[in-house]
Amino acid sequence: MKELASKYDHLNVEKDIYKTWCDEGYFKAGDKSKDPFCIVIPPPNVTGKLHLGHAWDTTLQDIIARYKRLKGYDMLWLPGMDHAGIATQAKVDERLKKEGISRYDIGREKFLDRAWEWKEEYASHIRQQWAKMGLSLDYSRERFTLDEGLSHAVRKIFVDLYNDGLIYRGERIINWDPKAKTALSNIEVIHKEIEGAMYTFKYKVVETGQILNVSTTRPETMFGDVCVCVHPDDPRYTDVIGKHVINPANGDELPIIADSYIDIEFGTGAMKCTPAHDPNDFLIGEKYKLPKIICMNPDGTMNECCGEFKDMDRFECRKALVKKIEAEGNLVSIEKHMHQVGHSERTDVIVEPYLSKQWFVKMKPLAEEVLKHQENPEEKINFYPLRFEKTFNQWLENIEDWCISRQLWWGHRIPAWYHKDSGEVYVGYEDPKDIENWIQDEDVLDTWFSSALWPFSTLGWPENTDDLNRYFPNDVLVTGYDIIFFWVARMAFQSRYAMHSRPFKDVLIHGLVRDAQGRKMSKSLGNGIDPMEVIDKYGCDSLRFFLTTNSTPGQDLRFITEKVEAAWNFINKIWNASRFVCMNLDADFSIDQLDLSQASMIDKWILKRLNETIESVSANMDKYEFALVGNELTSFVWDDFCSWYIELCKANLNSEDAAIRNAVKSTLVTVLSAIVRLLHPFMPFVTEEIYLSIPHRFESINLETWPNLIDVAMSDEEMSSVNELITMIQAVREIKTAYNLKPSADVNIIVKAADGTLRPCDDKINAILNKMCHAFWINEDSSEEVVTRTILNGTLSIQLSDVINVEEEIAKCEKEIERLKKEIARAEGMLANPNFTNKAPAAKVDAEREKLAGYTQQLALNIARLEGLKK
């Protein structure tokens, strides 16, 4: 057996052992004699370090994985990473910029070489962090969203969806990121409330000379205006419908059209229509077959449609154009206006609604298929907590088509080609045969398109692999509530389409990690926490235990350093208890010597409590209620095992009877072995160290099994006796503390039942009381005053003379009685004096009356106490 160091040092305990675990193949799945259980890791982006959110997310998964291995499952926890198109390309662009070049200088192929170099560098960092976190991943099955197998899967599903009419290419208004120069899906846009302005301009009617006031928040798009719209029933404008107005931005004549879409009550009731730069205007443009004029370049500058404003930044153009219109006398007003404006999730620039030819997934039929199966208990995805199923369903019910093309180089190239001569479009699994006559689409697919295939593409799909047949659908997904739309929903419909199945049975949702004040962690606030630094200071086990036992499913977690320290202290408590056990075992004590047949009442009590803990912990582990598990284990280990059993068993450890001593040692080993296995999913490193220092069956705790219930023949009466004993010890210690007695001071105790009858001494209990708290159970009541405390099933009393010097207390009491009598006489004299009661402020008189009442009450209490002391 390994010897435990005298002090717990997380740096030594957590050093080197992870490599041994991996080398020995403890995390490798594939034992077909067992039932399978599968989790695929939410793949982190290869863009940098893992943050606290990753640490929390992956620790939750590791807890489940280690628990399932202990429960006898063939556990596959599949690792992998995401290529993260926009984010990674931006990082590589930054690196090139520092070298004084851009991707356009080196071309697409060389840029992709540099991106792969980046991927290898940061994938290595991520693996090192996984190791430091102690994650039990099966690295033999690691995947990457751009590896050859996943690329094949992406092409396969794209072509299938296209052939089924569920992917199409069309000209639509999309979210455009002018900095990254790429389209974004709706959920890659973050809406922020910012202060803008509502600009109202004069539009002169050509035919009559009258003026229409038209408002907009985006004057720079006026160069793309094709008409002005009014409601057909608006009496202000019925006489101008069909006429024309002059666009004050460029002098163009615009038709005035009527459409019931226009809100009469909003603004002036006259709306400019810019089909190429607004999704609602686009629909009007389609309805009336209006031209769609794009007035901006992909980088957010104005194009040749804008005359003198060409090449000007869109927001600079806004200022300059308003200034020009004002100078020409056509500005009516500028009013401050708070509104929600979309920003790119990745670059944080304001997103531009932009007419563009892109590839889309037709979402409604795919979403309906998922929603239909959510009504079937055998087929649905089960959400923990349940309330997030409503969030999931509502988004699918209101889903819009998904723009999946991105104007990037790093990603899955869209498998579509255009014939150089005819313009024919070819979409296929293989490249066109006469490839020299075709040009492949330049765009790549949205990162989430490949991530949506993750539960099955990682297992070998579209090939019919053994892993796919064995481990799909996955058993559980662990993820944050912030990506239910981004990822969970997309995996649901892609799995339902490709596999005709749910992607996983359960989804465990967690929240976000916030700082101690509840604020979201961000660079701007400077409140971010590096989990690797926390591990260096407190250990991986402490961080893991804190992260996973301080928040219930679906709730945010506040990072509080003191709670990480508390986790370290808990581990230190276990360490010291383990050292006590080891020091009381003979060097040759083995697992074969465990014998509980001579277990004492105290031994059986801790074994019974262990059984209750195993049952409760197992039930809560299955429900993913890890905070409850943490509370239960902390209570059992700290209170029942360390504070009570280890103290209560010491007498029997020193017994002259070898069978009794062996029963205690067997109990200590049995309970500690169960404790480290129960805690192993949460704190793998320290539990391995302790496991190897006590009698054990295997070369590593990773090969162990979840503890079974122990056969304990203990009556309810015996259980009650031990629980009563604990309350007796607590009562004696409480009285000694209250009366400043030394713990070693001997006291006699009187025990009574709940009905007040005297309870005769129990010799076994009395022997333990003598040892634990220097208390002696006597079989006679006391005629003196006693100090009493409630215990289980009754009361415990100690004669007052045992805890205080009665003569000194009588003297103190008599002195206090004399003082109170003088105060009463003084107060009564003042209140009997009319000069005081009539002339003093009423508040002062009332205060004196209150004092008199208080003195009188205290006098009565002291007189009663004196009588009791003199008995």
Image (cartoon, grey):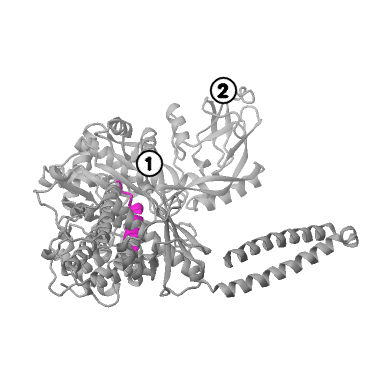
What residue is pinned by disc 1?
388
**Front position among marks 1 and 2:** 1
Q: Which residue is mark 2?
A: 232
* Residue 717, percent from left and from top: 30, 51
The answer to which image quadrant residue 5 occupies is bottom left
**In this view of the protein, which residue sits in the foreground, 439 or 519?**
519
Is label 1 in a helix, a strand or a loop?
A: helix
- Residue 632 versus residue 236: which sits nearer the camera? 632
x and y, in percent, of residue 152 in the image: 17, 46
Position of 661 with respect to 762 (left or right) is: left
Q: Which residues are magenta?
A: 623-638
Q: Nearer the viewer, residue 24 or 800?
A: 800
* 252 sits left or right of 107 in the view: right
Circle 2 sits in a helix, a strand or a loop, which is it?
Answer: loop
In the image, is residue 602 part of the stretch drawn in magenta? no
Q: Amino acid at mark 1?
A: Phe
Residue 51 visible, this orientation: no
Question: From mark 1 to mark 2, how far is it between C-alphas?
Answer: 44 Å
Figure check: 287 above or below 316? above
Residue 369 in view: yes
Looking at the image, residue 47 lies above or below residue 149: below
Q: Is residue 633 magenta?
A: yes
State whether the magenta stretch is mostly helix, strand or loop.
helix
Q: Position of residue 73 (x, y in %)?
A: 16, 50
Residue at 42% in and 62% down: 780
Task: Give neighbour class at mark 1: few <14, some 14-19, many 20+ (Cα, 10 Å).
Answer: some
